[in-house]
Image: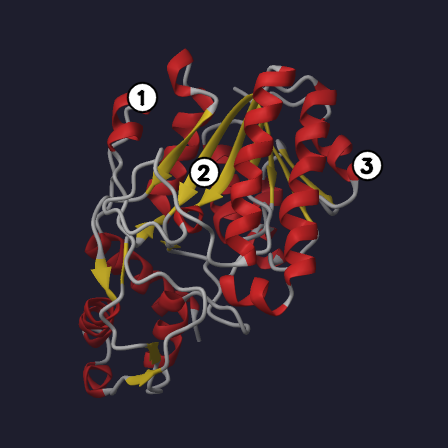
Amino acid sequence: MKKIVITGGAGFIGSNLCEYFLSKGHDVTCLDNFATGHRHNIEHLFQYPNFTLIEGDIRNLEDCHKATAGKDVVLHQAALGSVPRSINDPITSNDVNVSGFLNMLVATRDAGVKRFVYAASSSTYGDSEVLPKVEEVIGKPLSPYAITKYVNELYADIFSKTYGIEAIGLRYFNVFGRKQDPNGAYAAVIPLFVKQFMKYESPIINGTGDFSRDFTYIDNVIQMNELAMSTDNPKAINTVYNTAVGDRTTLNQLVGHLKEFLAEKDPAIANVEVIYGPNRKGDIPHSLASVDKARKLLGYEPSHTIREGLKEAVHWYLENLK
């Protein structure tokens, strides 16, 4: 069993990781400042004697040192997400995503932690029009957020070469699932649309709805973190991986799936209309990942397709959104 620190452990992805690794018997420390995470995501985890919460900020090096002391692995999930948020406030996004990331790398080095697995982003592909996205071909970033996530990869590479840290980046593609917050100005599209449909409100699609994404269920992301954390393949470390399904869904198709699954519970939802608005700044038209590298080097095999993941996610929201 490993001693794991999970930054952003009260957030959507982080809390799912905390819950999973605790269930496997690992010792888990959650570091979170609750800027975007929620206490209700982790309150049930205090029943585990091997769970520790450190309420702190990755922008504070002392907090990072406290969290990494005596640990075996860092799973770095803490960040300020959202392209629009970074466009509205690039300074704070940079402060958290770049300076905070560097603090965690320094603390990892100082604590002698060997393995550093971090949340990278599909936004790094920027204006590259190549489909599917392969890890070695990227374009120019299209938002401050994308710049911060690319800088993370550069810092991780330097710390691997200079200090011997085994860094593995996971480029997340539109992750969704249980515990994803439907509220707030920067809510992700799936929980936001579910919440609106449940209230018979018309969701707004940016553009014509033909833009497509590689929507990735949370269980696929958990699998990738576990594989990256535990691999002993020397060819699999000090690199980045697409963390996705390898299939794309348009926003119009997504709405169709959501209506279908929600209407099983409430048939009236099938009649809720969708509103189409202008395209959003910084958005790329299409995103589709190749997961061949993760399959070959990590043994990854997605457990959930988009439909399977959406069905589980909708069920969770019906149970938990009142």
Q: Separation of disc 1 and disc 3 at Cα?
A: 35 Å
SS at circle 2: helix
Residue 113, above or below 224: above
Residue 204, above or below 126: below
Q: Nearer the viewer, mark 1 or mark 3?
A: 1
Label 1 amino acid? Leu
Find disc 2 in the rendering and name its residue.
20
Could you tell me which residue is drawn at 35 percent across and 40 percent down?
Answer: 243
Find disc 3 in the rendering and name its residue.
62
Residue 251, above or below 170: below
Could you tell me which residue is drawn at 30 percent across and 63 percent down?
Answer: 285
Residue 44: x %, y % from top left: 56, 50
Residue 59: x %, y % from top left: 74, 46
Q: Residues within 10 Å of mark 1 (few under 14, many from 20)?
A: some
> Earlier along the polypeptide chain: callout 1 or callout 3?
3
Residue 320, above or below 62: below
> Earlier along the polypeptide chain: callout 2 or callout 3?
2
Checking the image for residue 297, the label placed there is 1
Quadrant showing the C terminus: bottom left
